[in-house]
Image (tube, rainbow, N blue to C red):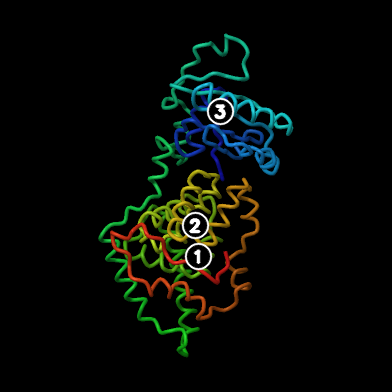
Amino acid sequence: MTIPKLVLSSPADILAAVPYLVGFHPTDSLVVAGVAGPEVRLTTRWDLPVASGDLDRLVALLHREAVTAVFVVGYGPGALVTPAVDTVTRLLHAGGIRVAESLRAEGGRYWSYSCGSASCCPAEGTPYDTERSHVAAEAVMHGLVALPDRGSLRRSVQRCGGAAMRQATSRVLADLRAMPESGEPVADELAARFVAEGLARVRRAIGLYDSGGRLDDEGAARLGLDLAVVRVRDEAWALIDDRDAHVALWRDLTRRLETGHVAPAASLLAAAAWHRGECALAGMALERALAADPGYSMAHLLRQALTHMMSPAMLRDRMPTPEELDDEMGPPRAIWLAPLRALLARDLPGPASASSPGGRQTGSPP
């Protein structure tokens, strides 16, 4: 993630920055922000109380990311926060990671575990205001968002498609059902044309959202179905970079697509969010993907990476380029369209079945 260089020179600055680093204002949470020199390298968050063993992989992650110091912030009452802060502090010291500041925040006040003097940490705590901080203003200026709470972040990936989107999807499905069957002589040519057009639509959509635009319902429905073809989906995955457009595009499709079609777009949202260090958003996107299709392989791969606190760079560095995808997968074949044909064979879900899981994708790479 390319995080703007926020100057964190005081506890109040740290507390103003954290909501923008995790994407929402935390409550009953433990947050660790790792820095390398002046740069915030990564931010991780756990619900409190922290489950046994959940912190065990933290030091290895910080070493992989070349973190030299951390800020530790616990949100909530002392009885909930202090044991978690003590545990993570012991792990960090044992791992040779310097704790630059360690705080507890509750009710608009903070207490410092790093300060042993009443002059810098009075018993009643020190008041702070994140809204008036220059750090918050700078974060907003750079496009960072801090939603009011975790529920708001979850709602930002929930389905909001309505009747117009269902009708648009019905039209697109009707058009695609007119494709020749796999056994017909032109089937491989059809697959090649479908993939080429799908790749072009992916790139145009990224450009559209990069310029502040948005797909109409029919365009969103068509791109959602394009992603059923693994080669098209993997093109979108390989193109993910630090631009806001990727999160904006795949979040928009995650919210608008019919449930049976959403797993690829939600998985791409997770990949884009994880690439930027937005692990909470990535986790919620994966919940949507796996609720729609419990067997979706890309979602399982990303969930394992998040669970094991892998660095996004570890997977990103292994991602093939679009040209390498062409070399690895070879020319398009009719079988590539099998997951799409499985979607076409199902009826379009109506409002009453909007929460039913989609069909499982099989026989395709993660």
Name the residue at 59% across, 72% down: 326
- Mark 1 surroundings: few (<14), some (14-19) or many (≥20) residues within 10 A: many
Say which residue label 1 marks: 233
- Mark 2 surroundings: few (<14), some (14-19) or many (≥20) residues within 10 A: many
Name the residue at 36% across, 61% down: 258
| Mark sitting earlier along the chain (2/1) | 1
Provide the secondary structure element on which disc 1 rests.
Answer: helix
Horizontal arrangement in the rendering, residue 221 relative to residue 40 (left or right): left
Say which residue label 2 marks: 268
| Mark sitting earlier along the chain (3/2) | 3
Q: Of tags 1 and 3, which is closer to the observer?
A: 3
C-alpha gap between disc 3 and disc 2: 30 Å
Q: Is residue 341 above or below residue 212?
A: below
Q: Are marks 2 and 1 in contact (CB under 8 Å)?
A: yes
Provide the secondary structure element on which disc 2 rests.
Answer: helix
Name the residue at 56% across, 29% down: 7
Q: Disc 1 residue type?
A: Arg
C-alpha gap between disc 2 and disc 1: 8 Å
C-alpha gap between disc 1 and disc 3: 38 Å
Residue placed most toward the observer, 28 or 247? 28
Name the residue at 46% across, 78% down: 193
